[in-house]
Image (cartoon, helix red, strand yellow):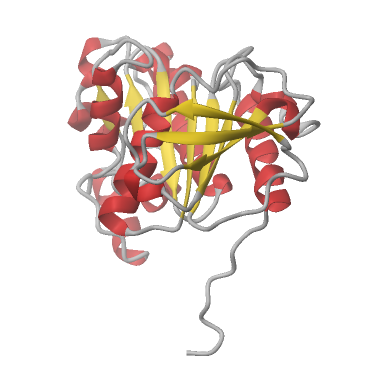
Amino acid sequence: MAGTEKIRPGLGEVLAQMGEAGRRICEIDASEAGAGNISVYLGWDTEVRRRFPLTEDVELPIPAPSLVGGTILVTGSGRRLRQIEADPESSIGVLKIHEGGLTATLYSSPRRRFEKLTSEFNSHLGVHEDQVKRRGVDYQAVVHAQPPHLTFLSHIPQYRDDEYMNRRIMRWEPESVVSLSQGIRVLPFFVPGSQEMMDANVAGLQVTDITLWSKHGTMSRSDISVTRATDRVEYAETGAKYEYMNLAAGGLAERLTDDEVSQTARTFGIESPWV
């Protein structure tokens, strides 16, 4: 049907969105120093050599045969998310995955300021591979951040339970059930960058769009935009901030009642396990 073809963003637009996302993540104190990372998968061949002319072959941390023919932009290890906007070439590498999905060409800029891609690239790559293989998406943004109130709550044992966490952070704003309808999948603590971390994260993002890595941070995904993946961090962190404030106040706040949350969900046509 005419007019229904999806518009594919160009390289410059994606780099600008990554910069905006990095700035916003830092504005909400969800990325101290070099913490946090962003990746974007484009399911089409994108010309990158004008801005990223240097090349080297690299081994991938996991096989990614479903991503062959696409392009992945990913932040470098130790780069500050707040610096992406001013000079994306210094902080981002671009991967073109070879046939078979075991190796790739890494394109980078002469202004590159990182030695390797983010140490959590296996989790990013795992999510991209899984979503493309299962759902056939041709675009996906993945954002790892370290929002302080969500991370703090995960240090309290009872909040490391999906039911307990979600019912408490979804009860402060009507927007929460609309924007985070499937809630957060809370994962146990795993060593960052480990196989266990990657496996649990991939599984978590099969059932929701944001996971909480206990005592560490979050990973969110969107097949619409980098902004949407970042919004999910912001909504979840806002709910956690209200929950933290209520804990600090001795539990005095009235909060949204269960009926008020249900009314909101019905009004906006939202189906949620937390209603």
Q: Residue at x 44, y 58 (%)?
A: 138
Up the image or down, 270 lies above or below 181; here it is below
Direction from residue 2 to residue 122 in the image, left or right: left
The answer, for residue 173, to whether it is visible in the render is no
Q: Nearer the viewer, residue 179 or 230?
A: 230
Direction from residue 61 to residue 158 in the image, left or right: left
Location of residue 274 by image quarter: top left
Residue lying furthest bottom? 1
Location of residue 193 by image quarter: top left
Up the image or down, 210 lies above or below 180; here it is above
Location of residue 192 by image quarter: top left
Up the image or down, 120 lies above or below 157; here it is below
The answer, for residue 153, to whether it is visible in the render is yes
Up the image or down, 71 lies above or below 135; here it is above
Q: Nearer the viewer, residue 57 or 157?
A: 57
Q: Residue at x 69, y 39 (%)?
A: 20
Q: Position of residue 67 (x, y in %)?
A: 40, 48
Q: Position of residue 44 (x, y in %)?
A: 52, 58
Q: Nearer the viewer, residue 137 or 218?
A: 137
Q: Residue at x 73, y 37 (%)?
A: 53
Q: Position of residue 135 (x, y in %)?
A: 30, 57
Q: Nearer the viewer, residue 188 or 191?
A: 191
Count of all numbered marks drawn on residues in the image: 0
Q: Residue at x 49, y 27 (%)?
A: 58
Q: Position of residue 96 (x, y in %)?
A: 53, 43
